Each structure stands twice: as C-alpha cells, then as structure tokens.
Image (tube, helix red, strand yellow):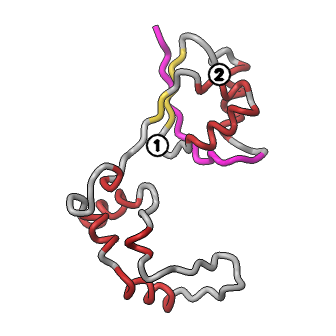
Amino acid sequence: GWRTIFVFLLRWGLGDNNAFLLLADAAEEFGMNGGGYSWFFSSDAQMNVLEQLSVTNSNVTKLLRGSGVIRQLDGFDYRSKEEDPFLGSWERQGPNATRQLQELYPVPSDLPGYYNISDTYFEDVLPEWESGFFYDSVMS
C-alpha cells in the first residue's frame, strides 16, 4: 500500500534555510521520494515558490511529482460580490476608508512600506488570499 504524508510547514519562501528544500533532501536520503509514498501539502504551500525550487533542485522535482496541495478557497475566489458578503463589504469601503487608513497609519513617501493608495483601491484590488476566512471567522 501507499504511505500518505501530510506536510504543514511554516516557511515556504526561498533562501538557504528553506524548510521545503530540507524536506526534499531528507525524503531523498531516506528513500521516501519515489513510489510507495503519497505527499500532500497544506493550504499555505505557495506553488510558484515550489515550482522555482524544483528548477534548481532535483529532489524537489521528484517530491512534487504526483503530490497534491490542499488549500482553503475564499468565497471571492468563485463568487461575485453580490453573492459573497466579504467581497461586497470590501468593495463598499470606498474613498472614505482609504483616507482613514492614510490618517491612521501615515507613512512618508520616502520610507519603506509606502504605498500610494487610490480612492478606488477597494474596487480595483482583490483582497489578500485567505482574508475572507478571517472575515468569516469574525463576522459569523
């Protein structure tokens, strides 16, 4: 039978101390990088980072071959603003909310972290991934 392994790592980003690279190398060393093993990665797995890692590390390529990713979908990923309470609330914030943000958290334009938010920001930009989950947790 197959041995199923679920992976929940905290650091997926690129860098020398990348937990996923260490995992892929360990899987290869212990013979867990081939047949007989089924790997699944948690919802915070960043597929674009994993793809970049696979280009430079054959152990990552082998580990990802046939693996699966389990992730939570926000309602706004597949519903309109009329159907999704979070996305509707997000888009209704309007220019007053952007001005309030700028007043509450003023960042001078010459400092890191400065972002020139437009009056139509909440209409033009989709919320960050998983933010619908936080909204649902608080509002329900």
Q: What residue do we see at 42% from left, 41% from top?
A: 71
Q: Secondary structure at mark 1?
A: loop
User: Where residue 15 sits in the image (x, y, percent)?
Assistant: 75, 47
Foreground: 139 or 68? 68
Position of 79 relative to 92 (above/below): above
User: Where residue 24 sits in the image (x, y, percent)?
Assistant: 67, 29
Q: What residue do we see at 45% from left, 89% from top?
A: 99
| Residue pointed to by mark 2 | 62
| Residue pointed to by mark 1 | 43
Earlier along the polypeptide chain: callout 1 or callout 2? 1
Q: Secondary structure at mark 2?
A: helix
Q: Determine the main secondary structure of the stretch shown in magenta.
A: loop
3 within the magenta span: yes
Q: Which residues make up the magenta segment? A: 1-15
Q: What residue do we see at 54% from left, 42% from top?
A: 45
**Which quadrant, please, contains the C terminus?**
bottom left
